[in-house]
Image (spheres, rainbow, N blue to C red):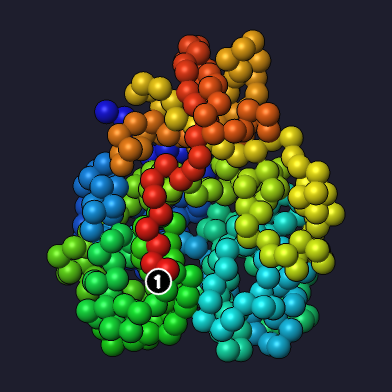
Amino acid sequence: MPVAPATLLENRVTDNQGQDLKQTPLDALHRKLGAKMVPFAGYDMPVQYDGILAEHQHTRAKAGLFDVSHMGQVILRGGDAAAALETLVPGDFQELPVGKMRYTMLTNEQGGIMDDLMGSRGSDHLFLVVNAGCKERDIAHIRERIGGRCEMEVLYDRALLALQGPAAAEVLARLAPPARHMLFMTAETLTIADVPCFVTRSGYTGEDGFEISVPEDKAEHLAGMLLHEPEVKAIGLGARDSLRLEAGLCLFGNDIDETTTPIEAGLIWTISKRRRQEGGFPGADVIQRQIAEGVERRLVGIRPEGRAPARAHTKITSTADDSIIGEVTSGGFGPSVEGPVAMGYVKTTFAKPGTPVNLSVRGKSLPAEVIKMPFVEHRYYKK
């Protein structure tokens, strides 16, 4: 049964071979737990501990702990920070309430996505989390464009842990009772096992869960406390990738990049009515035109028939004349759905759920169907 991570191992782990790799504050713990370590985004990272399939299923059933300390953490301070950030992203941060968070992306002048990121609103600041592989470029970009309008602090001394799964809230509430009452896409400063942390109820698995920003010198202690709970196991990057794929969540560098726009990627929901009308961010004219006139291609979910997975760069063809209509951007075996799943861009005329397509896999044309994402139901806590 193929259970390799959908795209991660194929496209990312060799990025920095031959270069000096950085370690996260949990590096010693990963090795103590027997993790298989691989190069990823300039870091030595755990891809698996007990096997990707087992780790994936454990996260869906109980709670998994992920080390995502390779991500970039940035604070923007000052009364003009929200307005300044809006000159770089299509997200609405001026109207974001304190204690709430938002998913958005840095765009270029062509409307393409330079990176996707999460932003949380504090009483006097914004807290941003950017992707590991882009963080130095993102930091330089933000500082160059808006550094004169707000104070920018890069948190190099913080680790980031993600606790994900249906038992995550119960587990975290034992160590920090207020966590139980947080809602999806909210943020609070909590004391967890005597450690001051910045916590968001969020994650990238489709499950309920939390991301915890913790001082790096307390990270191993806190991770150990969480792993001591019976529901929690350490989970590697392999399962993180298969979990996010089943949840229909985009991976930067695969499903979104500087050649894809938020509209093509189905991310119009991230752009509020005010931002759609006012613009004021890079590529706004392109994105506004696409909202009004439509796009020629769209990101869709694809379910191949049979058991053979369709990996990234697999050509998608028409069942009528075998012409190329698109390409898979992420694909692999979905343990929760017990079959192959994929995401990719197709011409808009083929994007309707239920449309039959073919996939060119190892020289063979295999049948598949366009379906509505996500492949598994999201279980975020929104009550």
Residue occupying the point 81% across, 57% down: 284
Query: Among all residues in the image, which is located at the extreme left?
Result: 230
Identify residue for label 1. Answer: 383
Whole-percent x, y for residue 215 in the image: 40, 79
Whole-percent x, y for residue 328 in the image: 55, 31
Q: Is residue 55 visible?
A: no
- Residue 200 or 354: which is nearer the viewer? 354
Whole-percent x, y for residue 34 in the image: 22, 52
Residue occupying the point 50% across, 63% down: 71
Q: Is residue 292 visible?
A: yes
- Residue 297 or 6: which is nearer the viewer? 297
* Quadrant containing the N terminus in the rendered view: top left
Residue 89: image quadrant is bottom right
* Quadrant containing the C terminus in the rendered view: bottom left
Q: Is residue 102 left or right of residue 335?
A: right
Q: Is residue 324 above or below residue 342?
A: above
Q: Is residue 111 above or below residue 71?
A: above
Residue occupying the point 44% across, 30% down: 303
| Amino acid carrying mark 1 in the image | Lys
- Residue 30 or 198: which is nearer the viewer? 198
